[in-house]
């Protein structure tokens, strides 16, 4: 999937994937990461998710990565934060108190630039990527985060009935990516009210990788 696909979606405000409220699974299960206020949470491919506001309200520090600069500008505006910007290699770093986001190609973000993180919240990153990109993504995420514990949101549905994103990712594939490095625990799963995009029955799941 080309970067231009997501840049066009944001430029044209075609962001039906954006949730207008906190993810209920995050609210219910975040404590499973056993982190303390002040700890640093990495949110890859973060967009302008409301979940960042929830994490900041609880006193966590958040670092994100996002391809679309328009999304990051809107994120800081909606949080009423005035960011400073600096160039870091091929990335642009937006930062304000408690929050920093690296804008650009996710694969250009390395361990040294990201810095230590205490947990990862993958709310819409893995499911946004086609199959041929997911192995590269999970390997890179694990490497730059130091295999930090993770909460992972996924979807299961009949991929033949609807093209992604978000893509259907069964437990067997998640195991292929992560079982050699984490203990995988399925915390919860719920049918999506109204189905995915109102077109196909789907289940939302949350995994704890520890």
Image (tube, rainbow, N blue to C red):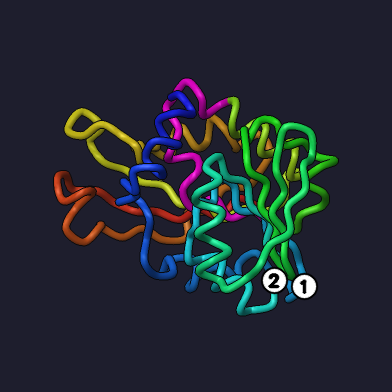
For the residues bearing labels 1 and 2, Cβ distance under 8 angstroms: yes
The residues colored magenta run 119-135
* Residue appearing at x 18%, y 48% in the figure: 201
47 in the magenta segment = no
Question: Looking at the image, which residue sits at the far top?
Answer: 132
Q: Which residue is mark 1?
A: 38
In the image, 62 versus 36, the foreground residue is: 62
x then y, percent, for residue 71: 50, 51
Q: Which residue is mark 2?
A: 60
Quadrant for the N terminus, please.
top left
Label 2 Cα crowd, 10 Å radius (few <14 / some 14-19 / many 20+): many
Label 1 Cα crowd, 10 Å radius (few <14 / some 14-19 / many 20+): some
In the image, 207 versus 107, the foreground residue is: 107
Query: Relative to 90, is 195 above or below?
Result: below
Tell me where residue 128 sits by quadrant: top left
Tell me where residue 206 sits by quadrant: bottom left
In the image, 70 versus 45, the foreground residue is: 70
x then y, percent, for residue 203: 29, 51
Mark positioned earlier in the residue sequence (1 or 2)? 1
Tell me where residue 59 sits by quadrant: bottom right
């Amino acid at each position: 999937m080309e970067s231009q696909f997501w840049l066009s979606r944001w430029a044209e405000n075609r962001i039906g994937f954006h949730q207008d409220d906190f993810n209920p699974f995050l609210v219910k299960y975040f404590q499973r990461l056993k982190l303390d206020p002040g700890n640093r949470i990495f949110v890859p491919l973060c967009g302008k998710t409301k979940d960042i506001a929830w994490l900041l309200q609880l006193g966590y520090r958040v670092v994100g990565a996002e391809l679309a600069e328009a999304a990051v500008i809107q994120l800081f505006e909606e949080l009423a934060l005035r960011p400073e910007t600096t160039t870091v290699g091929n990335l642009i770093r937006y930062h304000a108190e408690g929050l920093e986001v690296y804008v650009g190609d996710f694969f250009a973000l390395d361990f040294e630039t990201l810095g230590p993180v205490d947990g990862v919240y993958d709310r819409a990153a893995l499911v946004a990527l086609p199959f041929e990109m997911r192995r590269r993504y999970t390997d890179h995420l694990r490497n730059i985060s130091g295999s930090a514990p993770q909460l992972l949101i996924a979807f299961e549905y009949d991929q033949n009935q609807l093209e992604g994103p978000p893509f259907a990712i069964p437990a067997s594939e998640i195991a292929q990516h992560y079982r050699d490095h984490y203990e995988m625990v399925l915390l919860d799963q719920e049918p999506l009210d109204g189905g995915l995009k109102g077109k196909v029955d789907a289940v939302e799941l949350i995994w704890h990788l520890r």
